[in-house]
Image (cartoon, rainbow, N blue to C red):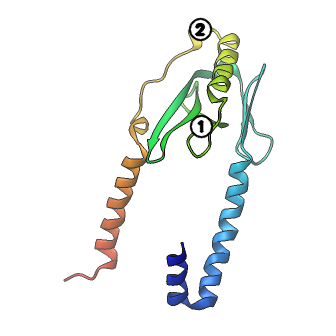
Amino acid sequence: MLVEGAAAVSQFGMVGASWILGGTIVLLTPLALVGSRGWSRIGADGITICWGLGRGRTYPWHAIRWIDKRKTQSQDGSAYAVRMFLEGGRRRSLPGLYHSALHPADDFDEQFQRVVNWWELSTDPAGRVQPQKQFRDRLTPVVIGAVVVIVVAAVVALVILPPH
């Protein structure tokens, strides 16, 4: 980070680097606040999720077709998130129900089981349908990173580098 700061000062001067730093802070602070305030609530009426703004949205039990735990591998190890699949095929992650090496949650499995128990007690077994795997289920952070590197390299080669 220090290297980027020194590069910004040498490229844009102290005033330009200050504007870049200030703009970054202005853009990232609201995102960090919203991201840290997300929550999920389970009750008789269904699952209510809120990503940090407003009162949240409640998904009734009859509209939830499946609940599972998604595992994502990265350099830092495994991360787990609870997802619900809705009757229209859409899926939603439940904010606050997350476990990783960076954000350990000792009671993650207990909370996941609590959500599943509520769902099973509140729905008809015939309405529970496990969704098929989709293309995006195969996208891992490594695959996404490789695609981004290839796209950026192609853009640099086509746009920035002068033709010979």
- Mark 1 or mark 2, which has the lower sequence index? 1
Kindly indicate whether the residue at mark 2 contacts the one at mark 1 (C-beta within 8 angstroms): no
Q: Residue at x 35, y 54 (%)?
A: 147
Q: Which mark is residue 107?
A: none
Could you tell me residue 26's position as x and y percent?
70, 69
Q: Amino acid at mark 1?
A: His
Please name whichever residue, 164 or 103, is drawn nearer the observer in this view of the structure: 103
Q: Residue at x 61, y 25 (%)?
A: 109
SS at circle 1: strand
Please name whichever residue, 134 or 68, is drawn nearer the observer in this view of the structure: 68
Q: Residue at x 61, y 78 (%)?
A: 20
Classify 41 as above or below 142.
above
Could you tell me residue 11's position as x and y percent?
50, 88
Separation (CA) of disc 1 from disc 2: 28 Å
Could you tell me residue 38's position as x and y percent?
72, 43
Q: Which residue is mark 2?
A: 125
- Residue placed furthest toward the left: 164
**Which corner quadrant of the image does residue 80 belong to?**
top right
**Which corner quadrant of the image does residue 124 belong to?**
top right
SS at circle 2: helix
Q: Which residue is mark 1?
A: 99
**Which corner quadrant of the image does residue 16 belong to?**
bottom right
Classify 96 as above or below 24.
above
Q: Quadrant of the N terminus?
A: bottom right
Please name whichever residue, 23 or 9, is drawn nearer the observer in this view of the structure: 9
In the visual, does 60 lie left or right of 145?
right
Q: Amino acid at mark 2?
A: Pro
